[in-house]
């Protein structure tokens, strides 16, 4: 009985790993606070440049 249980546990563990790999990630990629500030600064500069060109 123990041998069967151990074999089943191994198969279940492998199946769990495979399913985890195949599942898609819904969590967005982490962006650090410094990178977010840098992106915001760049977008603000682009907006300023566009408004200066229009005027």
Image (tube, grey):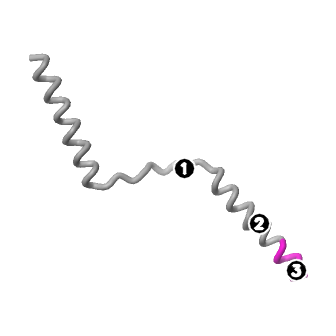
- The circle on residue 25 is 1
Identity of the residue drawn at 48% across and 51% down:
27
Q: Earlier in the sequence, mark 1 or mark 2?
A: 2
Q: Residue 14's x, y, as percent? A: 74, 64
Q: Residue 52's x, y, as percent? A: 10, 23
Name the side, left or right, on which 51 lies relative to 24: left
Spatial CA span between label 3 and label 2: 14 Å
Extreme residue toward the bottom, this view: 2
Q: Residue 42's x, y, as percent? A: 21, 38
Identity of the residue drawn at 91% across and 81% down:
1
Circle 2 crowding by C-alpha within 10 Å: few under 14, some 14–19, many from 20: few
Quadrant where the C terminus sits is: top left
Q: State whether residue 18 is above or below residue 10.
A: above
Q: Residue 49's x, y, as percent? A: 14, 27
Q: Which residue is mark 3?
A: 3
Q: Earlier in the sequence, mark 3 or mark 1?
A: 3
Q: Secondary structure at mark 3?
A: helix
Spatial CA span between label 3 and label 1: 35 Å
Spatial CA span between label 1 and label 2: 22 Å
Identity of the residue drawn at 84% across and 73% down:
7
Magenta-colored stretch includes residue 33: no
Q: Earlier in the sequence, mark 3 or mark 2?
A: 3
Which of the 4 quarters of the picture holds residue 15?
Answer: bottom right
Q: Secondary structure at mark 1?
A: loop
Q: State whether residue 42 is above or below residue 17.
A: above
């Amino acid at each position: 009985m123990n041998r069967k249980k151990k074999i089943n546990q191994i198969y279940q563990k492998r199946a769990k790993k495979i399913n985890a790999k195949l599942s898609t990630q819904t969590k967005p990629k982490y962006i650090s606070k410094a990178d977010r500030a840098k992106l915001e600064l760049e977008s603000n500069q682009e907006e300023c440049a566009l408004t200066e060109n229009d005027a």
